Image (cartoon, rainbow, N blue to C red):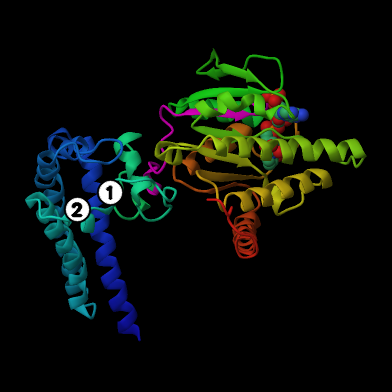
Amino acid sequence: MVSLTLGLAIAVGSILWVELVRDFYHLLAHLWRPLYRLHVWHHRVFRPDLVAVSDTIYRQAHWYNDVPEALVMLAFSLLPWGLVYSWHLNPQWLAVTGSVYTLFFLISAIARGLGIPHADELTDLTHRPGNFTSLPSRWLVNRPYHWRHHFDNQNAYFCGTFTLVDKLIGTALSLKGKTIAVTGASGSLGQALLKQLHLKGAKVIALTSSVQIITLDIEGKDLSIKTIAWQVGKESDLLPVLEQIDILILNHGINVHGERTETAIATSYEVNTFSIWRLLELFLKTVRTNEDIVRKEIWINTSEAEVSPAISPLYELSKRTLGDLVTLRRLDAPCIVRKLILGPFKSNLNPIGVMSADWVAKQIVNFAIRDMRNIIVAINPLTFIIFPIKEFFVSTYFKIFSHPPRNR
Ligand SMILES: NC(=O)c1ccc[n+]([C@@H]2O[C@H](COP(=O)([O-])OP(=O)(O)OC[C@H]3O[C@@H](n4cnc5c(N)ncnc54)[C@H](OP(=O)(O)O)[C@@H]3O)[C@@H](O)[C@H]2O)c1
């Protein structure tokens, strides 16, 4: 039993190792000019619909990029052999798994370089043309994930098979050049998020229900940013703006604290739940093309109140309903929907919050570029355990007892 487990670990470890080598080779190819001269052939091959520009360039790219990459992986695949041998781990022969695995990539790259018919269909799966039928995957690189490396930002999305390296170095989502709009822009977190996103190279838009132009403090200087006014109940007025937006962050919210009047109930649900749900639906309608599917995203600030008390019953009720609606709706969403699960931070809404809005905003961006779909920033350690469990079970329940739209 022990040797079976160890054997499995050796085999899987040797594959993971060569995949790490592949991703670092790719990263190096973008950082080191001499290697980039070879790698750039790979970037010359495809049009945005992933149809090859020409058969000659397609084949050439394999000789200059894919074959050398596989040879480097093959050379490094010997390292696990050496380790297993010197540490006297058994069964030693399983360390060959990484090399055999790499040989498959080497032979298929040679086959594509030689132009052997159908070699690409069988072995070059992340570059196949056609409509995207799924979202960028979280753990395994699929076509929508890899498309972004070619046509969104070549300095991100480096991974070839597993997305681990991109998650570690923060290149699993590029914000550079993206148009990102934030609601609740005049509030503490709204302003802090706009600043962090601006610093990451995004083109930010403030969506506010107030009349002021939003300015950001960037290195001691005031920077006025594009500000668009909107009102709860008039969400559809924002549709032309939403069409232009890559990432929409729904962050506005209200806390009626201890109130429980009819007005307090209506306001809490209208602002915290239904206006956000209406904006979510409007935004999802703007996702139409392959490019929209991979570039557009929506982040929704539902709060830690989804799973723990906020000492404000109507705040909890409205945020929990919102949280569940998002869980339900993202089962069929045509683009990535992230949840922001935030613990208490200081703001108008929560003057006794413990964290600072700036720190929270920094963490949100740090997790987003690592492609976390549920971004938890909290001081309560239980939230990190309870929220994922709750989300898993609620999502599974919704999946089993509801169905996708029948006219899809
Ligand atoms: N502070 C916390 O401890 C905490 C914890 C977890 C989650 N959250 C959530 O984080 C988000 C941001 O809150 P914050 O703490 O930064 O509070 P904040 O400073 O009060 O900001 C909230 C913003 O929401 C917008 N808003 C308020 N009432 C509105 C209305 N009736 N219609 C449209 N917009 C309205 C306002 O922005 P505009 O005037 O620009 O529209 C307001 O500045 C909220 O969703 C909140 O629930 C906060």
The secondary structure type at the circle numbered 2 is helix
The residue identified by callout 1 is 128
Spot occupied by residue 88 in the image (x, y as percentages of width and height): 21, 77
Spot occupied by residue 19 in the image (x, y as percentages of width and height): 26, 57
Quarter of the displayed picture in which ligand 1 can be seen:
top right
Residue 334: within the magenta?
no
What type of secondary structure mainly makes up the magenta span? loop
How far apart are the alpha carbons under marks 1 and 2?
A: 8 Å
* Segment colored magenta: 167-187
Alpha-carbon neighbours of circle 2 within 10 Å: few (<14), some, or many (≥20)?
some
| For marks 1 and 2 on the same chain, the one whose residue lies earlier in the sequence | 2
Residue at the outermost left position: 114
Residue 207 located left or right of residue 4: right
Residue 167 located left or right of residue 211: left
Residue pictured at 23% horizontal, 38% vertical: 46
The secondary structure type at the circle numbered 1 is loop
Residue pictured at 82% horizontal, 44% vertical: 314
Residue at the outermost right position: 261
Q: What's the residue type where badge 1 is placed?
A: Arg
Assign the N terminus to one quadrant of the image: bottom left
The residue identified by callout 2 is 120
Q: Nearer the viewer, residue 207 or 303?
A: 207
Spot occupied by residue 34 in the image (x, y as percentages of width and height): 12, 35
Viewer can see residue 293: yes
Spot occupied by residue 235 in the image (x, y as percentages of width and height): 68, 29
Viewer can see residue 154: no
- Give the vertical position of 164 relative to 365 (above or below): below
